[in-house]
Image (spheres, rainbow, N blue to C red):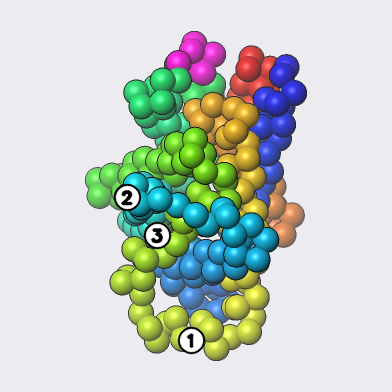
Amino acid sequence: MNTHRLRGYTLILVAATLWATLGIIFKALIGDYGLSRITIAFFRASLSAVILFAALALRRPSSLHIVARDVLFFAAFGLLGIAAFYSVYVTAIDLAGMSVAAVLLYTAPAWVSLISAVFLGEKITPVKLVAVMLAMAGCALVARVYDVRGLQLNWLGILAGLGAGLTYALYSVFNKVGLRRHDGWTVLAYGLLAGSVFLAPLQSPPLLAAALRQPGAVIWLLVLALGPTLGAGLSFNAGLRHVPVSSASIVATLEPVIASLLAFAFLHERLDPAQLIGGGLILATVIILTWAA
């Protein structure tokens, strides 16, 4: 396998691992400090933007240079790939439950394959089609969609979940397109900034102030910004330089498997046999896709 491809897939796996820590961080912020999901979404985008802009201004100020025609692109990225994704995914969790929302979120590989084929000229190969089907089946098992009693299905919740999958796919595609003109640092910085602007009107000033008055919450928010946001985002962007965006999105479906293992280790949540089978299917997808590249 090509060395650059191997490096790209490794970086995508690093991003997936960092994203998998979100559940632990969210549990602390929501359960221990009472923050709402939309408040967490705003702080995640805004704190990350501030940190990244400060770092680039000190170390690589030339990376902050964009031209007028870039403004519309970053506005679209911030609106559809960050603000809309956070908002729609929260709606899906509220209306359909976490299991259904998680499964529908990982329709993203199918959306990415379609979008990248139409707009980026990437081919949908038979191997990629099989990988998508295996990944989707694995995610369904890991999320325990077979537990009918735990599901709270409704059409609006399903549509919101599909919207989350679509906007997550758009996050990947916008990054791929942005990397044609800018480095990953620039793309992520301006995407987060634009996302913060669109999320700001949805916030409650008293809730924002209450969060900042809690030192523990501030520490967790910084961990959220530095780890699964900046760390994962930059790793993902770096990986996209070496692999097709559709393949990267499929490899990233390893995230729910890693998240389940972290939940078992730190939150004492147990994996049942069907979930283990689902994790095996996703791992098989990663292996097939990697060696077929």
Residue type pointed to by label 3: Ala
Residue 167, position as x, y percentages in the image: 38, 45
Q: Is residue 156 visible?
A: yes
Rendering quarter of residue 289: top right
- Residue beneath disc 2: 72
Tag 1, which secondary structure? helix
Q: Are marks 2 and 3 in contact (CB under 8 Å)?
A: no
Which comes before the other along the chain, label 2 or label 3? 2
* Closer to the camera in the image, 10 or 4: 4
Which comes before the other along the chain, label 1 or label 3? 3
- Residue beneath disc 3: 194
The magenta-colored residue range is: 123-129
Dot 2, how many residues are within 10 Å of its Cα: few (below 14), some (14-19), or many (20+)? few
Tag 3, which secondary structure? helix
Residue type pointed to by label 1: Ala
Answer left or right for 4 relative to 37: right
Identify the residue shown where x is 48% and y is 39%.
181
Is 88 one of the magenta-colored residues?
no
Tag 2, which secondary structure? helix
Dot 1, how many residues are within 10 Å of its Cα: few (below 14), some (14-19), or many (20+)? few
- Residue beneath disc 1: 210
Identify the residue shown where x is 57% and y is 44%.
183
Dot 3, how many residues are within 10 Å of its Cα: few (below 14), some (14-19), or many (20+)? many
Which comes before the other along the chain, label 2 or label 1? 2
Select label 2 or label 1 by which is in front. Answer: 2
The mark found on residue 135 in the picture is: none
Q: Is residue 28 visible?
A: no
* Closer to the camera in the image, 249 or 20: 249
Is 125 one of the magenta-colored residues?
yes
